[in-house]
Amino acid sequence: MSRPPPLRFLFAHPAHFIALGCGSGLSPWAPGTAGTLFAWLSFVLLQPFFSFAGGLFFLLAAFTGGVIAIHKTGLALREPDHGSIVWDEIVPFWLTLTLTPPGWSWQLAAFLLFRLFDITKPQPARWFDERMKNGLGVMLDDVIAAGYALLVLAIARFVLNHG
């Protein structure tokens, strides 16, 4: 695994600050998990300020800006999907939480499922991870992980409501 860049790198360009998840990606241990935890905390803080439609617009803007920030930061680090780049965990996990049933236990399940699918990268996530070495590819494999997590949550909710 790549070593985290120095703290000064975080503030060298706004794209780096975004791509490194406001610093959460500088964690020397499990930066992807640290970024996802940052996403969970920031979601709880940001959610009250958005309507559902406003939240989706915010996610679209965060995704689009993230593709650019991740690409620029990956070039600066000479590694397109450097371990410290965690915006690709943050935005898809915000989407996951937006569509997750309310309640702490559902959010915990969403966190665990998202991390599972982000780490294991089932197809087609693995294809994007291995072949699309740019900001869009880095973001898309995590969006797919979010989709898998949401699918499992939807099945669980169906079973619990109809079982």
Image (cartoon, grey):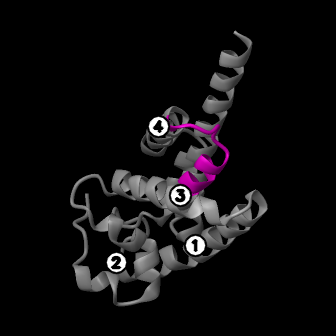
Q: Which segment is the magenta one? A: 92-104
Q: Earlier in the sequence, mark 2 or mark 4?
A: 2
Q: Earlier in the sequence, mark 3 or mark 2?
A: 3
Kindly identify the amino acid type of the residue bearing the numbered disc 2.
Leu
Kindly identify the amino acid type of the residue bearing the numbered disc 1.
Val
Mark 1 sits on what residue?
67
Task: Classify 154 as above or below 62.
Answer: above
> Residue 45 location, x and y as percent?
51, 61
For the question of whether residue 141 can be seen, the reply is: no
Q: Earlier in the sequence, mark 1 or mark 2?
A: 1
Mark 2 sits on what residue?
77
User: Pointer 1 and pointer 3: residues touching (CB < 8 Å)?
Assistant: no
For the question of whether residue 138 can be seen, the reply is: yes
Outermost right residue:
53
Q: Secondary structure at mark 4?
A: helix
Outermost bottom residue:
12
Q: Earlier in the sequence, mark 1 or mark 4?
A: 1
Q: Which mark is residue 43?
A: 3
Q: CA distance from mark 3 to mark 2?
A: 28 Å
Query: In the visual, does 54 lie left or right of 110?
Result: right
Membership of 45 in magenta stretch: no
Q: Which mark is residue 113?
A: none
Task: Classify 103 as above or below 92.
Answer: above
Camera-near label (1 vs 4) is 4
Q: Which mark is residue 108?
A: 4
Q: Residues within 10 Å of mark 3 (few under 14, many from 20)?
A: some
Q: Residues within 10 Å of mark 2 (few under 14, many from 20)?
A: some
